[in-house]
Image (tube, helix red, strand yellow):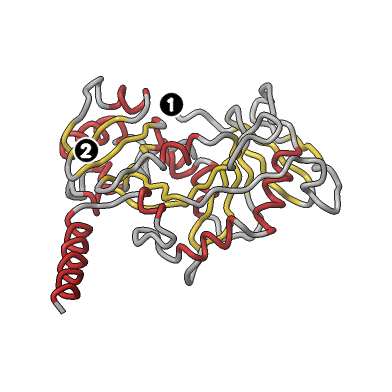
Amino acid sequence: MASRGRRLSIALALSASALLTVTGPAAAKDPLPADIPDYQAALDAVKSTTVRNAVCRFLSVPVPTGNNGGTPSSQPIPDKADPCEGLPAFTVKDPVALNEVTPGFAAGTARPIATKAVKLTLLVAALNAPVNGRNATVMLAPTQGGGWHLAAVREGDEDAAQASKATVGTLVFTEPQIRGWYRLKLTTVEPLNDAARQGLDGRPSVSLSEYQNLVKARTADRLPGSEFDTKGFSSGSGPEQQAGRSTSTTPLIIGGSGAALALAGGTLLIRRRRATSH
């Protein structure tokens, strides 16, 4: 009986700790991490034939190079009954949370606390190993009514690699407009890449309140409703974000070199992404 009471006390203490600190993708080591809703559906999605075939189609088409001035061009997908034919075997890792700064936090209207500053927008999962010298990241978006669906496949594995840097009691998030990645521990923000270090003016860490002031100063003219946003240049209008918010069953495939590849009717329609700096 005493042993049972001790286990219950430990469980309650751990639950309280989870409420007091925002845990991030490190919880993905658990088969069903509590910070990701419907995680079993996400696991099923990344292991599905649909995702496997989409990744194979993506890897079967060379990464677009050069600049077409934003003019769409097309590139046929190899016509194979099995899209993965001829490609080395690969698996997709378990998905982790991709968290982003919220518009309210960036605007300064939300309080500088973790639950108001950052939100889960996508799940990302990289391949277990490069395929013919290339890696790719599967991006899952929440499905209306519950669950997750394939939203995009993107060149490289940076998103998943950065998102996986969360540890117990911390949360990793991105500031998409500068491509900065940060770790949040309680109310302290630390940079994880060069863009984030520049975003913190070279400081090794700042308080969440200080970080909010920095974000507000550099994004005030880019928030929803601004001229920057209405012309389609803000982070909320980029191809990655459209992919994350898509409810279509046809995935957008994001390529390298700033290009977006949309899968449509057996053809990859290639459109170069507009710059997000001014």
Residue appearing at x 17%, y 56% in the figure: 20
Q: Position of residue 132 (x, y in %)?
A: 71, 32
Residue appearing at x 17%, y 72% in the figure: 3
Question: Quick check: 183 left or right of 155?
Answer: left
Report the quarter where the C terminus lies.
top left
Which element type, helix, strand or loop, lies under badge 1? Answer: loop
Q: Position of residue 126 (x, y in %)?
A: 55, 43
Mark 1 belongs to which amino acid? Ser
The residue where tag 2 is placed is 212
Against 52, residue 191 (above or below) is above
Q: Position of residue 275 (x, y in %)?
A: 50, 28
Against 156, residue 250 (above or below) is below
Which element type, helix, strand or loop, lies under badge 2? Answer: helix
Callout 1 crowding tier (Cα within 10 Å): few <14, some 14–19, many ≥20: few
Report the quarter where the N terminus lies.
bottom left
Mark 2 belongs to which amino acid? Gln
Question: Quick check: 25 left or right of 129?
Answer: left
Q: Position of residue 36 (x, y in %)?
A: 39, 59
Nearest the eye: 130 or 63: 130
Residue appearing at x 54%, y 31% in the figure: 274
Q: Disc 2 vs disc 1: which is toward the camera? A: 2
Residue appearing at x 39%, y 30% in the figure: 178
Q: Distance between the Cα atoms at labels 2 and 1? A: 20 Å
Question: Quick check: 53 left or right of 161?
Answer: right
Q: Which label is found at residue 277?
A: 1
Nearest the eye: 115 or 225: 115
* Label 2 with label 1: CB-CB less than 8 Å: no
Quadrant of the image occupied by residue 236: top left
